[in-house]
Image: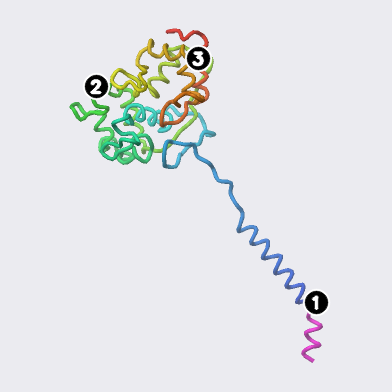
Amino acid sequence: MASDLLFCLKPYIVKLTLVALITAIILWAIACKHEIPLTTPDTGGGGNVDSLPTGGTCSPDTVYFVNSILPALSSGCALSGCHDQATHQEELVLSNYNGIMRIVTPGNAIESKLYRVITAGNEDIMPPPPHAPFSSAMIASIRKWIDQGARNNQCISACDTSLFTYSGAVAPIISINCKGCHNPASLGGGVDLSTYNGVKVVALNGRLTGSINHASGYIAMPQGSNKLQTCQIRQIEKWVQAGANNN
């Protein structure tokens, strides 16, 4: 009797089993849906970047770490013998976000060691003499970045390749990204980029464009930091091709 009942119910059991199996497969597929991970650009070490390169253009009311703070500190503080990876004086490496944040109090520049040392009026000032101190404009940018939360952010800066004069395009790029390591007090590679004449020399002999393009046979510049934006590289290239004039 029981066997006859089981025989009669067998088709229904098979159907129920198939329905349960299909349902389980559907639920598994939903649960295992993968999101494509977003890749963040290299910021010289550590930290999540708030704005990816595919984001919007820079806001004039915001200071961006990757665009201005990192290049300035890498050039002015992460020097050989100071706060680079090799020397890490005082156990500080100031060529990446994580290292810089060790001396930053987000939202409070006044309480941040970074801000205090770049504004110190004595022998404690950084960069130390005979290195040139940060400009008042850069100090203001660092303070604003800290007070805005010291985020590891970046944006796409407005860049026009039709502008490629020395004063309007090349000099500002060199000042932020290169001059800290290439000045009379710190002649990295024996190169002085603190004056037009010094920049002109490496422009005409090919070292400038070779380095910023990370070309084979040249030391990649800015050293230990991000490659310049494609637009900035093109501005420099066009200036060099036009004769590297002091315009």
Q: Looking at the image, is mark 1 or mark 2 earlier in the sequence?
A: 1
Which comes before the other along the chain, label 2 or label 3?
Answer: 2
- The residue carrying mark 1 is 11
Q: Residues within 10 Å of mark 3 (few under 14, many from 20)?
A: some
Q: Is residue 142 magenta?
A: no
Tell me which amino acid carries mark 3. Leu
Q: Which residues are magenta?
A: 1-10
Question: Which residue sits at x=45%, y=39%?
Answer: 49
- What kind of residue is marked 1? Pro
Residue drawn at (39%, 38%), measured in percent from left and top?
Answer: 151
In front: mark 1 or mark 2?
Answer: 2
Residue type at mark 2? Answer: Pro
Residue 92, placed above or below residue 177: below
Query: 89 or 172, which lies in front?
Result: 89
Q: Residues within 10 Å of mark 1 (few under 14, many from 20)?
A: few
**Which residue bears the numbered disc 3?**
163
Q: In which image quadrant can residue 94 be found? A: top left
Residue 8 located within the stretch drawn in magenta: yes
Task: Classify mark 2: helix, strand or loop.
Answer: loop
Residue that mark 2 sits on: 130
Image quadrant in which you'd find residue 2: bottom right
